[in-house]
Amino acid sequence: MALEGEPGRPLADRLRPEVLADLVGQEQLTGEGGALRRLVNSGSLGSLILWGPPGTGKTTVARLLAHETDLAFEQVSAIFSGVADLKKVFETARTRRKMGQGTLLFVDEIHRFNRAQQDSFLPVMEDGTITLIGATTENPSFALNAALLSRARVLTFRSLDEAAILRLLDRAEALTGEPLPLMPAARIALARMADGDGRAVLTLAEEIWRAAAPGEIFDEAGLADVIQRRAPIYDKSEDGHYNLISALHKTIRGSDPDAALYYFCRMCDAGEDPRFLARRLVRMAVEDIGLADPQALVHARAAAETYEQLGSPEGELALANAVIYLATAPKSNAAYLAYKSAMRLAKEAGSLTPPKTILNAPTKFMKSEGYGAGYDYDHDAPHAFSGQDYWPEALGRHHFYDPPERGFEREIRKRLEFWEKLRKERNRG
């Protein structure tokens, strides 16, 4: 099927909105009461950082803001530009400012500039030479200078949901005058394959139009054959990586094995290193399950070792077993919290000496100084528990570990309560 339109001009560019209200999927920013709408209505933008996934409208918004505020639009990409290019833009902006017009400088992929390059924006932002709008797919808190962030407002763009993607497809059909040759289920599948990326779904739509013979309509299998399935939006060094491992950790902590398996499989499908996942599962076992189920760590380590023996994809099943085990295990962070509290005290207390009763006396002099004197050998005491005080005298006793009434820690709590009872009885005696 022929796709009508301007030769060489992508469909995504032809569908680019001409006013903010036409932007799809970012109504929280562009609708009535939205942050962008308020800024435009006020007549003063200020510098902005637009943060969000690819294909969510960041570049489009920058262009529209320049138009709606009568600012001259300049665009550079951090991938292809250096300090020399920026200096030329700044000089042009200064000249333009003397003539009474401001400049909106849009910097795509601004996180790719190094710290020194980011610093070069600060003087021209402060004196009003430019209004900076930077676009980034990475978390600005980690990717951008604190000084730059302090001079700009961060606006968060969301991945387009299924309804927004379908609205884009409706607009594409209206523009081209041709319905997409897809069965209803295939149309929904196409929307999901876009991973929330509006530009991507329009590119895929163009491929479908070009591939369809006259009168041909694709079902889901035909759609997969035509587009060969777009790779998931995922970069092991970028936000996709951290977002999904965070989701996996929290779903295991939240005892939802089905959601945990879903995020685990998404990461495997996207090419994540299973050894990284194995290490994180071991961490989850000790942080979120701990002694509520001591076997959790055993399972996590066994899964990691099994993966090393079998490799992919067979070894991933062992990791999936561990995901299910950890998600369904009783949860406790009591040991984790006890460790953190003890570490804080250890740093604060410095080098306090333990009681001499529990110090060895390898020399006669140390023995004469009382090292080891009065130590009670616990195995000689009833219940193998002497109840003596092991804390530095200047510090006194502290309580870190508070096991909950869950899983194996219920038994540990009983032991601690029994020993505390014996300790009090011994001290009274």
Image (cartoon, rainbow, N blue to C red):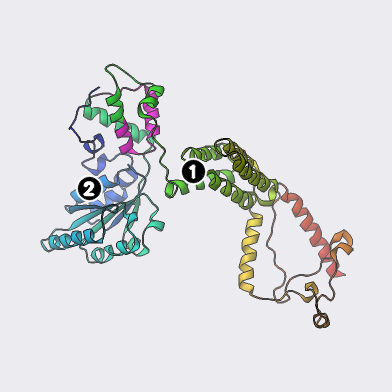
Residue at left offset 79%, top offset 55%: 415
- Which image quarter holds the C terminus? bottom right
Q: Is residue 35 left or right of residue 63?
A: right
Residue 148 within the segment the image draws in magenta: no
194 horizontally vs 98: left or right: right
Distance Cα–Cα, label 2 vs label 1:
36 Å
Name the residue: 58% across, 46% down.
278
**Local SS, label 2:** helix
Q: Which residue corresponds to mark 2?
A: 63
Query: As shown in the figure, which amino acid type bears the numbered disc 1?
Result: Glu
Q: Is residue 108 above or below residue 307?
A: below
Question: In this view, which residue lies farthest toward the left?
Answer: 99
Q: Quadrant of the N terminus?
A: top left
Q: What stretch is highlighted in magenta?
A: 178-204
Which corner quadrant of the image does residue 10 belong to?
Answer: top left
Which residue bears the numbered disc 1? Answer: 272
Question: Which is the main secondary structure of the residues drawn in magenta?
Answer: helix
Which amino acid is tagged 2? Arg
Residue 56 point in image, percent of width and height: 33, 42
Query: Which badge, 2 or 1, is on the more N-terminal residue?
Result: 2
Q: Could one spot residue 249 in this view of the protein?
A: no
Which residue sits at x=63%, y=69%?
Answer: 345
Q: Can residue 373 be seen in this view?
A: yes
Where on the picture, by quarter, is residue 216? top left
Dot in front, 2 or 1:
1
* Picture disc at residue 210: none
* Horizontal side, residue 67 vs residue 202: left or right: left
Secondary structure category for the residue under label 1? loop
Rate crowding at label 2 as few (under 14), some (14 to 19) or many (20 or more) other CA atoms within 10 Å: many
